Image (cartoon, grey):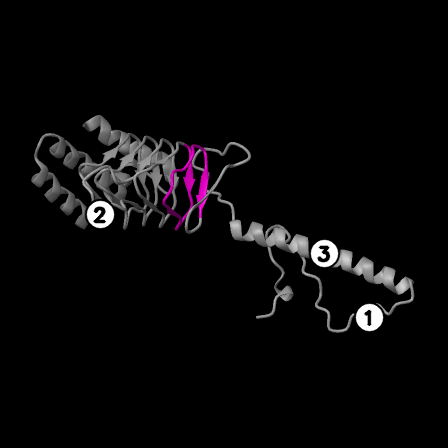
Amino acid sequence: MLATLRRDLRTARDRDPAARSTLEVALCYPGVHALWGYRVNHWLWTHRLPLLSRVGAEMTRKLTGVDIHPAARIGERVFIDHATGVVIGETAEVGADVTIYHGVTLGGTSLEATKRHPTIGDRVVIGAGAKVLGSFTVGADSRIGANAVVVHPVPPGSVVVGVPGQVISPSRPQPAHDDRLPDLVGISLQSLLTRVDRLEAARARTAVTAGADGAAPGDGAGERPPIRLPQAGVWQGEDFSI
């Protein structure tokens, strides 16, 4: 047990650059305290002391803001950052080296007394406010974006963003604990604007050709200025009327 507690402290120091010392982590990190409480409560649960383990879990929730059912299975080197509002259900399983941010729910969608909570693979990162609901597996090395709502299985090495969660297969391997996530709305807008720009260019060429043939192509009065694509991810505000 002492080796496990020391490993939890070392994990928090490795994952959080704000941690200045092991003593600071031991005294000031509610996510670490929640894991310690869970490990004691889980031991009580597995030794046929369910009521005592549930009382311990309730005390841990009040002290840390993290609600972990003592029957859940949590692997080694899990880190709960900021901790507040995290909920992990009874039949949830969390693999090794998983990072969970505040406001995350690993919940169920069934009222039957069966496996109804998700299984999280190793090295998964779950962003703040994400909800993973149902009895399915999130594959290893996946990343769940902030506030995503995941209700279907996730293949290993995927990125999930949006509501409902959309699974993206990255084009290249991602570094461990990389927090960069794709902007699906931005990508869609950029693709749409690129298409509109091409159509307007084709229209302009057609108008020039018509003018050369003697037709009046028009003086362009009242036409909107062209929309410029973002430069370095920054949209130009003068392109949009508010």
**Count of labels shown?**
3
Task: Report, in whole angstroms, how far the alpha carbon at label 2 lies from the one at label 1.
Answer: 69 Å
The C terminus, quarter of image: bottom right
Which residue ends up furthest to the top in the rendered image? 3
Residue beneath label 2, please?
Answer: 64
Ranked by sequence position, the earlier of labels 2 and 1 is: 2
194 with respect to 204 (left or right): left
Residue 118 pos. (x, y %): 30, 39
192 with respect to 15 (left or right): right
Residue 221 pos. (x, y %): 77, 73
The reply to whether the C-beta atoms of the residues labelled 2 and 1 are less than 8 Å apart is: no
Q: Main secondary structure of the magenta part?
A: loop
Residue 98 pos. (x, y %): 34, 35
82 with respect to 228 (left or right): left
Ranked by sequence position, the earlier of labels 3 and 2 is: 2
| Residue type beneath disc 1 | Gly
Q: Which residues are magenta?
A: 141-161
Q: Nearer the viewer, residue 237 or 188?
A: 188
Q: Quadrant of residue 71?
A: top left
Labelled disc at residue 218: 1
